[in-house]
Amino acid sequence: MSRTTFRNGTVLTAAGPVTADVEVAAGTIVAIGKAGSGGDEVREIDCGGLWVGPGFVDIHTHLREPGHEYKEDTESASRVAAAGGYTSVVAMPNTDPVIDSGHLVRYTIERGREVGLVEVASAGCVTAGRAGEKLAHLDDLWAAGVRLFTDDGDVVADAGLLRRAMDYLAQLGGVLAQHAIDPGLARGGHMHEGPVASGLGMYAIPSAAETVVVARDIELVRLTGCNYHVQHISAAPTVELVAAAKREGLPVTAEVTPHHLAFTDGDVQATDPAFKMMPPLRSAADRAALVAGLQSGVIDAVATDHAPHADHEKDVPFEHAPNGVIGLEWAAAVVNDRVGLDPVRFFEAMSVKPAAIARIANQGHWLATGAPANITAFDPKGVTDVRQSRSKSRNAPYFGRRYAGAVKYTMYAGAMTHEESGVLV
């Protein structure tokens, strides 16, 4: 039987980080400690200086399949995810057709299995057709394996409809994930409302577009007891709302994207469409609050909101460009560079908490004997030099930049899915 041994890394276990070897065979971690000498069928990997922990989990990925495969598809997105240290992703349902029925969930999951580089889970729509008018068949979606429900790309604006969804999901134990952007306050806006937008003479979106939705939804959490997750949090006041809800003991979680941790509305000054996203990049004070929230654990998880667009769609004036950036490949390096988490909090935010939020059973476990061999080895002192991408699309603000930290190895189900020198070539 062939085996792989990760030697002498800082291994993330339930008891904390330990310097140890991790031995893998037949898709399972068979030993953590001091492994014996290798043989002909043992591959040994020197992990001195590396953090060796559970494979990263992204709970906010746009695979673009079905319907927009020219931007990305399951195969290309899986390659990108593996390069970024991910062993699981949750596919967002704003595809064409939208994922509002069980057979489309099963298709999405099966396509992930066919590619075999990461575990693909599927979110499901809250409302039929993402139209916000009536509930999707939540029971059908649940039976097909959906545990996280969202109309991502649009907010569920109707409070009564949202309350009914929360009531039902509270009974099932599912998670309502909200794209918290009030459509009226955001209408016509392209960037954060502030001095930069005023200087550019650009229609803008206030932070209140996010906070009014989250504040309303937290009231509904009190009413229903539903698990509630704030997607791509962007504003300092929202961090405070989430913190207060957690202090109250409400089942509220939140995610932050690498781009909101790395950039601010000041980066939009040149009106490069690579910096156009929803929610928009906000002020330096907002960015600082996001960093502090992730460090403290008020913000539970990093989620990429990997949103590919073709060149011809983004190569237009800023106001006409679609929202969204890619980032699966570089998320870990960006977080390491801009936030500076210790190894425990790093793997909590990148793996353990996301897997728990999305209820992904075989992912996000601290490394232990007998656990599935979903492993990422990360070099916190490495360098990621962003030059190219394995994605079909290139809409990212990271190109031409260097970040401290590099994914060295990704193993999914005992198979090595990625080995990286730290420089994209």
Image (cartoon, helix red, strand yellow):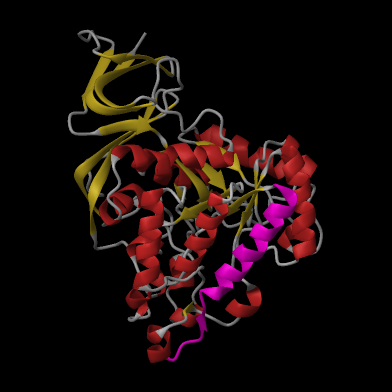
In this rendering, the answer to whether 423 lies above or below 408 is below
Which of the 4 quarters of the picture holds residue 45?
top left
Q: Is residue 203 magenta?
A: yes
Is 216 situated left or right of 206 in this image? right
In the picture as drawn, the residue positioned furthest to the front comes out as 248
Question: Disc count in the image?
Answer: 0
Q: What residue is drawn where x is 75% and y is 35%?
A: 143
In this view, 46 is above or below 240 = above
Q: Position of residue 234 (x, y in %)?
A: 47, 65
In the rendered structure, the answer to whether residue 240 lies left or right of residue 174 reads left
Q: Is residue 398 within the magenta segment? A: no
Q: Is residue 3 visible?
A: yes
- Residue located at (25% from left, 44% from top): 406
Q: Is residue 154 visible?
A: no
In percent of the image, x 55 and y 42: which residue is there? 357
Q: Nearer the viewer, residue 67 or 417?
A: 417
Q: Name which quarter of the figure residue 262 lies in.
A: bottom left
Residue 163 as seen in the image, left or right of residue 279? right
**Region of the chain picked out in magenta, as a range:** 201-225
Q: Nearer the viewer, residue 173 or 311?
A: 173
Residue 232 spot, x, y in % from top left = 50, 59
| Overall secondary structure of the magenta section | helix
Q: Find residue 48 and report its horizontal and vertical position in percent.
A: 17, 29
Name the spot of residue 204 as percent of width and height, x first.
50, 82
